Image: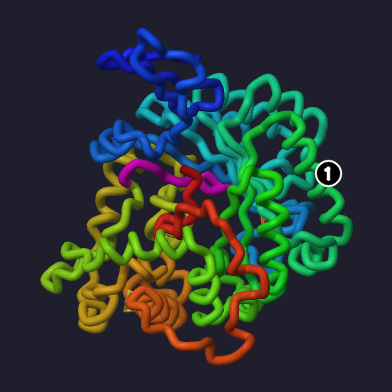
């Protein structure tokens, strides 16, 4: 544990990377300490404003042992071509070294399923040796004793596990992988037993929508009440048309999404907070034709499994990626990123729609998602538009009864005592 003494207050960082704040140092004791997430600490925000790459996501593979219906990335576990193109351990070390030398403190390890990499323990250990806080995204099905020993000795800051169903039937309806529910339960139990801080989240799709109350219960029982859900299904980064059609077929309707949000008190509060920030005056200035108003590339970046730097995980347009195998992270961050953030659109229909939209804070629209949906950075997305307008109606308290039984939140959902303090941000899933 590292301890700092600041103006008579005790501030420490524990092994998992949490800031612990205590009372005045003369009477400081463990019992006075309260846990505070790093993102909530104002120093993090202040450093963020100076455009330092504080955190980064490292996608170790696009392969996965599951085959989820809604997945925006997965390729089969045994896909040789995909495996061959993955960054090797040495490449990863170079990227990590440079990231740390530029100020990185936090690394999110993701996939596909990162535990499919045989060298996962070496990569993980290297990140820890570099002093990074490490968050791991995993489906937990491959967690074994070796991982548990590793995490017990060198704890991750947290492990975020996706829960696709609370029963074998629902879980495997989503993952399309027989036996995956059993492996998931076993892996999750191991993680919980070894004391790792586990966060549980659910992607909500038509295939598991009716089971959401059971999924929420399952999660809350294991995480002291913490659980978050996300009903926004991203389209594929590889643009696969068949898979995209499948994803669209699994999306909830705008009414269903809003019904879920209405029935979850904390999520509803978060929605209101977003609404209070409306109108984003900078964004709604019609004389500005800028595309990026989010935080992409301001304090974090993403590296895909083939070594391509992106400002965020969703911004996959080839013109917006930088090949780290041929260049340096410093060049990607200091030269390439500002040029991307400076992109403009001259289209009148952009300036008249998303470019000056008064409810953009309630919308999933951003140049990255617009590109995934339409092949263009600057077109509105009908589905997003519908959800954003429904949310506005909800916040203004004008919502009527759901159009049909289909649109109602699943029974039991209204009893959620959510701890979900976050909406999906325009930079994608936030691990902070
Ligand atoms: S477990 Fe995750 S990475 Fe694997 S297929 Fe499902 S959503 Fe995709
Ligand atoms: S998609 Fe619609 S609601 Fe969303 S920003 Fe564009 S115009 Fe606004």
Residue at horizontal 42%, vertical 53%?
321
Q: Position of residue 363 (x, y in %)?
A: 38, 71
Mark 1 is surrounded, within 10 Å at the Cα level, by few (under 14), some (14 to 19) or many (20 or more) other residues, namely some
Which secondary structure, mark 1? Answer: helix
Above or below, 201 against 288 in this view is above
Above or below, 277 against 102 in this view is below
Of residue 230 and residue 106, the one placed in the foreground of this image is 230
**Residue 301 covered by magenta stretch:** yes
Of residue 244 and residue 382, the one placed in the foreground of this image is 382
Residue where numbered disc 1 is placed:
186
Segment tinted magenta in the rendering:
298-308
Residue at horizontal 71%, vertical 40%?
117
Residue at horizontal 29%, vertical 16%?
6
Queried on whether the Cβ of the residue with tag 1 lies below 8 angstroms from ligand 1, the answer reads no
**Residue 75 covered by magenta stretch:** no
> Which residue, as the protein is rendered here, is positioned at the far bottom?
403
Of residue 70 and residue 332, the one placed in the foreground of this image is 70
Figure quadrant, ligand 1:
bottom right
Q: Position of residue 265 (x, y in %)?
A: 49, 62
Above or below, 348 against 333 in this view is below
Residue at horizontal 39%, vertical 43%?
300
| Any part of residue 94 in sight | no
Q: Position of residue 123 (x, y in %)?
A: 63, 30
């Amino acid at each position: 544990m590292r301890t700092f003494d600041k103006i008579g207050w005790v501030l420490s960082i524990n092994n998992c990377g949490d800031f612990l704040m205590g009372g005045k140092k003369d009477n400081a004791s463990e019992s006075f300490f309260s846990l505070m997430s790093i993102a909530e600490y104002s120093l993090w925000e202040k450093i963020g404003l100076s455009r330092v790459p504080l955190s980064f996501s490292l996608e170790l593979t696009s392969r996965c042992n599951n085959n989820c219906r809604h997945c925006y990335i997965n390729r089969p576990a045994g896909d040789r071509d995909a495996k061959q193109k993955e960054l090797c351990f040495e490449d990863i070390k170079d990227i990590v070294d440079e990231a740390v030398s530029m100020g990185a403190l936090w690394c999110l390890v993701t996939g596909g399923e990162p535990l499919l990499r045989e060298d996962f323990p070496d990569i993980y250990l290297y990140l820890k040796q570099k002093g990074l806080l490490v968050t791991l995204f995993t489906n937990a099905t491959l967690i074994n004793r070796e991982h548990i020993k590793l995490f017990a000795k060198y704890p991750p800051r947290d492990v975020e596990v996706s829960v696709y169903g609370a029963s074998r039937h629902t879980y495997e309806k989503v993952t399309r992988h027989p036996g995956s529910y059993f492996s998931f339960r076993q892996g999750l139990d191991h993680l919980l037993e070894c004391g790792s801080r586990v966060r549980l989240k659910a992607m909500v799709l038509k295939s598991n929508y009716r089971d959401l109350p059971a999924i929420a219960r399952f999660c809350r029982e294991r995480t002291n009440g913490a659980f978050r859900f996300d009903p926004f299904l991203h389209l594929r980064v590889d643009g696969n048309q068949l898979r995209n059609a499948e994803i669209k077929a699994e999306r909830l309707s705008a009414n269903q999404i809003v019904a879920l949000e209405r029935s979850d008190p904390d999520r509803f509060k978060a929605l209101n907070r977003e609404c209070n920030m409306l109108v984003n005056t900078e964004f709604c200035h019609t004389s500005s034709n800028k595309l990026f108003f989010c935080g992409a590339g301001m304090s974090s970046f993403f590296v895909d499994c083939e070594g391509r730097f992106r400002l965020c995980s969703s911004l996959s347009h080839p013109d917006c990626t930088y090949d780290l195998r041929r260049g340096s992270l410093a060049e990607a961050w200091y030269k390439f990123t500002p040029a991307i953030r400076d992109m403009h659109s001259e289209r009148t229909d952009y300036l008249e729609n998303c470019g000056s939209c008064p409810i953009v804070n309630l919308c999933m629209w951003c140049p990255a998602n617009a590109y995934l949906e339409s092949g263009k950075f600057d077109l509105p997305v009908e589905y997003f538009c519908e959800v954003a307008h429904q949310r506005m109606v909800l916040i203004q308290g004008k919502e009527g009864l759901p159009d049909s039984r289909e649109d109602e939140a699943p029974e039991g959902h209204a009893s959620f005592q959510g701890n979900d303090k976050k909406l999906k941000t325009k930079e994608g899933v936030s691990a902070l």
